[in-house]
Amino acid sequence: MALSYWERNTLQHYDLIVVGSGLVGLSTAYHYATSFPNKTVVVIERGLFPTGASTKNAGFACFGSLSELKDTASTIGYDGMIELVEQRYKGGLELRALLGDDAIDYRPVGGMELGFEAMSSADIASMNEQLQPLFKEPVFLEQNERISEFGFSEAVVSLTKNNFEGTIDTGKMMQTFMRRCSQAGVAFLTQTEVLEVVPGEQPKVEVNVGDDRVALHAQQIALCTNAFTQRFVPETDVRPGRGLVLVSKPIKNWHLEGSFHYHSGYNYFRTIGGRLLLGGGRCLDLDGEQTFEFGTNPTIYNALVKDMHTLIAPGKNLEVDYHWSGIMAFGATKQPKLKCVDQGVYAAFGMGGMGVAIGCGMGRELAEMMAEENA
């Protein structure tokens, strides 16, 4: 591909190249651009929309159900769990403060966990005590009396509410963030695949343009590719985790106000636009869902459809309208990673399925790290 004088001398060169236009990538680009208004920043995205999970999630502003937090504490200890909760909760607050609740359609509806055996009052009290220094009031509350109100199956015997969770409109969130980035002077190159990242004093990325490779040069490069980071940094321990989401056809005279979880947070559902949105089931085939391929696992799909008919809305005769999958990223622990991976190349990855909660904060921290190195 023959480049013009203007392309060679201006459009090939940037102060910062951000690879990945998901929530972390947008946050990195925005915070860097606002800190350095005279520097040039470009975000490169291989898809028309973000490839991973930022535009494919369920729109939950959450930090963990009671069962999920208990499981987390059992693996990394209560101190580690509390640190993770704080990061997720404060990260969500940061996102809301930056973009505005109205702009992202944030609704503080709480998070309900469906239980298939009695939830211990002692467990609720213990978790509330552990989280008291952070929230200053009880986080979890028994709401078993509301089970019949929601019309769930008789298999549901307990309902526990997280008072500090809510829902957002993911599309509006990303649209608002992209607008903020554009206003800050960030440029975008979509449907542009990065073939190689070359570190060094003058790092560069090589992108695919038709049948040609074109090099884009930068002072610094930020990899905000989450599950796909291993493609550029093979030694990372992050692994992909595919999540399936399905949406029903419109439902007449039925609405569930809230966000709902079951199976220790692996499964989740809500209503949106007069439809049921239901996702998860990765726990049914953790090894099989450790894939970079977008697609549908029939076992998981069938399990979700069965839950829709027999657990969530028995007798409602709901029908699936369409479904999709997104690729999340999980490390050996649930803590996200932020590091300089090579000369001039930095990365944030391993969001652990909590990108909405922590993505904005991780992007800001990555921008701050690069600013310090650039000082």
Image: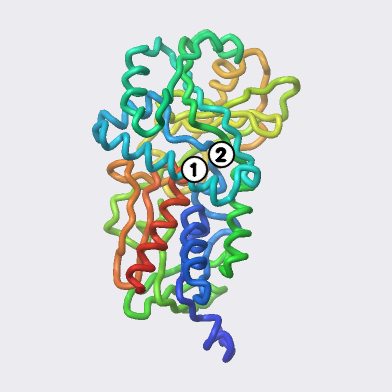
The C terminus: image quadrant: bottom left
Q: Which amino acid does label 2 sit on?
A: Gly
Residue 109 % position (x, y): 57, 28
* Observer-nearest of 305 and 26: 26
Rendered position, 350 above or below 132: below
Report how far apart the C-alphas of labels 1 and 2 lie in the structure: 15 Å
Residue 356 % position (x, y): 49, 44
Q: Do the residues labelled 1 and 2 touch (CB within 8 Å)?
A: no
Look at the image and tell me whether residue 96 can be seen: yes
The residue under label 1 is 93
* Observer-nearest of 55 and 28: 28
Residue 7 % position (x, y): 57, 85
- Residue at coordinates 65% horizontally, 13% vertically from top-left? 315
The N terminus: image quadrant: bottom right
The quarter of the displayed image where residue 345 is located:
bottom left
For residue 70, side relative to residue 26 (left or right): left
- Residue at coordinates 50% horizontally, 14% vertically from top-left? 143
For residue 169, side relative to residue 237 (left or right): right
Residue 59, label in figure: 2
The quarter of the displayed image where residue 310 is located:
top right
Count the marks: how many?
A: 2
Rendered position, 257 above or below 56: above
Q: Which of marks 1 and 2 is in front?
A: 1
For residue 341, side relative to residue 64 (left or right): left
Look at the image and tell me whether residue 299 can be seen: no
* Observer-nearest of 370 and 3: 370
Q: What residue type is labelled 1?
A: Leu
